Image: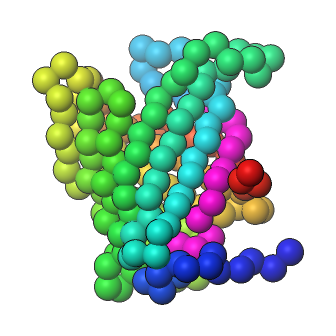
Amino acid sequence: MAFVIPEGLHEDLYPLAWMVGKWGGKGMGEYPGVPKFEYTQEVIFRHDGRPFLEYSSRSWLIDSNGDVIRPGASESGYWRIKPNRVLEVVIAHSTGLAEGWVGRISEDRPAIQLAWDSAYVAPTAKTVEDGARLYGLVDGQLFTSYDMAAMGKELQAHLWSSLERQVEA
């Protein structure tokens, strides 16, 4: 099936056109002091014709049978492309953290690397000091990873998922 640029997408967003839509699937997570866990995730990239994407992600912790245990993390934000394929991303978490990310869009494949730029941490939120994110299209699936340095720990792998494109009703 040939890929089609979404109707009404602002031309500045063409390098991100492959991300637009709803994605869903499973992921894994771990961090020092936290047992390994599995989750399901829903990620949505939307546009309204202006030069940015709206982003949202929700997750649910699952057991080894794939049954939902409870809601997990959620975040939302905006992705903006600047000259020379530079990407600026702002993401707010339900945990009281708002992050600024800067990255580049690959010129030769559908992939994005984001580096932590700055953050606001609410007074009662857990402190996060650094991060790295990766988004890529691998065999038709959206692969995501999030490395994190938090609570005095070094930057290390925290979350990763493979998500399939979903048909929106």
Q: Where is residue 116 in the image (x, y as percent from the top left)?
A: 29, 52
Residue 4: image quadrant is bottom right
Left or right? Give the position of 11 relative to 97. right
Whether 121 is among the magenta residues is no
Q: Looking at the image, which residue is at 13% across and 23% down?
A: 123
In the image as oriented, which residue stretches furthest toward the left? 123
Q: Where is residue 122 in the image (x, y as percent from the top left)?
A: 17, 29
Residue 131's place in the image compared with 128, above or below, is below
Q: What stretch is highlighted in magenta?
A: 16-28
Task: Residue 166: tell me if it is visible.
Answer: no
When the figure is inspected, residue 147 is found, relative to residue 126, above or below; the finding is: below
Name the chief secondary structure element in magenta: strand
Q: Which residue is drawn at 26% across and 23% down?
A: 126
Quadrant holding the N terminus: bottom right
Left or right of 55? Residue 5 is: right
Residue in the foreground of this view, choosing between 2 and 37 = 2
Q: Which residue is drawn at 74% across and 77% down?
A: 3
Residue 26 in view: yes
- Reply above or below: 91 against 110: above
Q: Does the magenta stretch include residue 25?
A: yes
Outermost residue to the right: 1
Q: Residue at x 41, y 45 (%)?
A: 76
In percent of width and height, residue 61 lies at 60, 21
Q: 25 left or right of 108?
A: right
The percent coordinates of residue 64 (x first, y second) are 75, 16
